[in-house]
Image: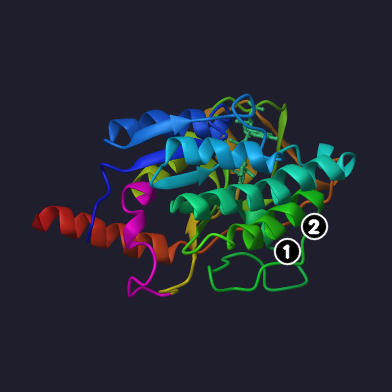
């Protein structure tokens, strides 16, 4: 098993919730990180993205930039589509031109997660969709855009900031998301070992999707771990349609991490 501690990662979305948590962890793990945001290149500008990636010549492009306002996307569909879909296409093309591996950050919202279909516990190999809202549609389309880069790795995840910004949290939305520090630790492990994520012999081997998440719980149960005073809420209160259960099966991640730990112990 190869570890990639000398890897140079160019990370889009570096000023975002995930990017800010991930960069220091990657650096701590010996990965060289160049973090960029919209001031460096707007992902909607293909030429600017191409020049940026070419200039840095990274081994990995970790694409964490996105339009993430799920409710706002219903009113500004064009911006959400351009940033998430066209933007990912530009990043994938730039990664391909630079010979860099693309690690694309996707979402559990690519699944329907409803009561009328087998909900939750989605595996990497399950067909995604249909989707609930505009943001989810763009994240699903972005996965296909990411595949313009050869050997792209699509990481489906979900996370929350440490400080919950709302008075309530949904008791009827089930998820495998976790706090961003927990997810950033898992993603650091994946990025360090990205070269091993592919045809690795575990279930889904050769599949280009990896679920990076933790156990199934309601958003309310997650939030009250660190915000005990949060009040229960329901999805019907949200200004946008949301899934009921988008929990992700993480067997593949568990098998990979067990193999990485075994290899480290044997080294
Ligand atoms: N938060 C969640 O629960 C969740 C769940 C599943 C998946 N995800 C995915 O995880 C990734 C990171 O999400 P996040 O919550 O960390 O995002 P975030 O906090 O909303 O930050 C968005 C990042 O994207 C950048 N960005 C936005 N528009 C851009 C543009 N046009 N050109 C270049 N950069 C642009 C922003 O840069 P500026 O600061 O310069 O604007 C910022 O760095 C996204 O792909 C998101 O879809 C998030």
Q: Residue at x 51, y 55 (%)?
A: 96
Q: Which quadrant of the frame does ligand 1 lie within? A: top right
Pointer 2 residue Cβ closer than 8 Å to ligand 1: no
Quadrant where the N terminus is found in the figure = bottom left
For label 2, the residue is 132
Q: Residue at x 59, y 47 (%)?
A: 91
Could you give the CA–CA distance between mark 2 and mark 1, rounded to whole angstroms?
6 Å
Residue at the right extreme, as displayed: 75
Q: In the rendered structure, are the residues bearing label 2 and label 1 in contact, judged by CB atoms less than 8 Å apart?
A: yes
Name the foreground residue: 79 vs 181: 79
Q: Residue at x 76, y 48 (%)?
A: 135
Quadrant where the C terminus is found in the figure = bottom left
Horizontal and vertical percent position of residue 124: 53, 68
Horizontal and vertical percent position of residue 235: 79, 47
In this picture, residue 224 sits left or right of residue 239: left
Horizontal and vertical percent position of residue 100: 44, 51
First to last magenta residue range: 190-203
Q: Residues within 10 Å of mark 2 (few under 14, many from 20)?
A: some
Is residue 179 something that shows in the picture?
no
In this picture, residue 260 sits left or right of residue 243: left
For label 1, the residue is 112
> Closer to the N terminus: mark 2 or mark 1?
1
- Residue 191 highlighted magenta (yes or no): yes
Horizontal and vertical percent position of residue 86: 72, 49
- Residue 81 highlighted magenta (yes or no): no
- Residue 161 figure quarter: top right
- Residue 205 figure quarter: bottom left
């Amino acid at each position: 098993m190869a570890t990639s501690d000398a890897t140079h990662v160019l990370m889009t979305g570096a000023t975002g919730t995930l990017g800010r948590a991930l960069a220091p962890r990657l650096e701590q793990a010996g990965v060289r990180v160049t973090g960029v945001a919209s001031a460096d290149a707007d992902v909607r500008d293909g030429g600017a993205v191409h020049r940026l990636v070419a200039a840095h010549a990274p081994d990995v492009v970790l694409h964490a930039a996105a339009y993430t306002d799920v409710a706002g996307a219903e009113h500004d569909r064009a911006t959400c589509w351009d940033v998430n879909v066209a933007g990912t296409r530009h990043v994938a093309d730039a990664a391909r031109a630079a010979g860099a591996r693309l690690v694309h950050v996707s979402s559990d919202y690519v699944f329907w997660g409803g009561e009328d279909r087998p909900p939750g516990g989605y595996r990497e190999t399950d067909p995604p969709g249909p989707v609930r809202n505009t943001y989810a549609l763009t994240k699903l389309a972005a996965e296909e855009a990411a595949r313009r880069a050869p050997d792209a790795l699509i990481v489906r995840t979900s996370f929350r900031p440490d400080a919950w910004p709302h008075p309530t949290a949904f008791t009827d939305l089930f998820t495998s998301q976790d706090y961003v520090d927990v997810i950033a630790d898992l993603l650091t492990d994946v990025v360090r070992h990205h070269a091993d994520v592919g045809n690795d012999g575990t279930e889904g081997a050769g599949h280009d999707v990896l679920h990076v998440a933790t156990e199934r719980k309601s958003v309310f149960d997650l939030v009250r771990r660190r915000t005990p005073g949060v009040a229960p809420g329901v999805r019907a209160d949200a200004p946008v349609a949301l899934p009921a259960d988008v929990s992700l099966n993480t067997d593949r991640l568990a098998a990979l991490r067990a193999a990485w730990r075994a290899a480290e112990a044997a080294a």
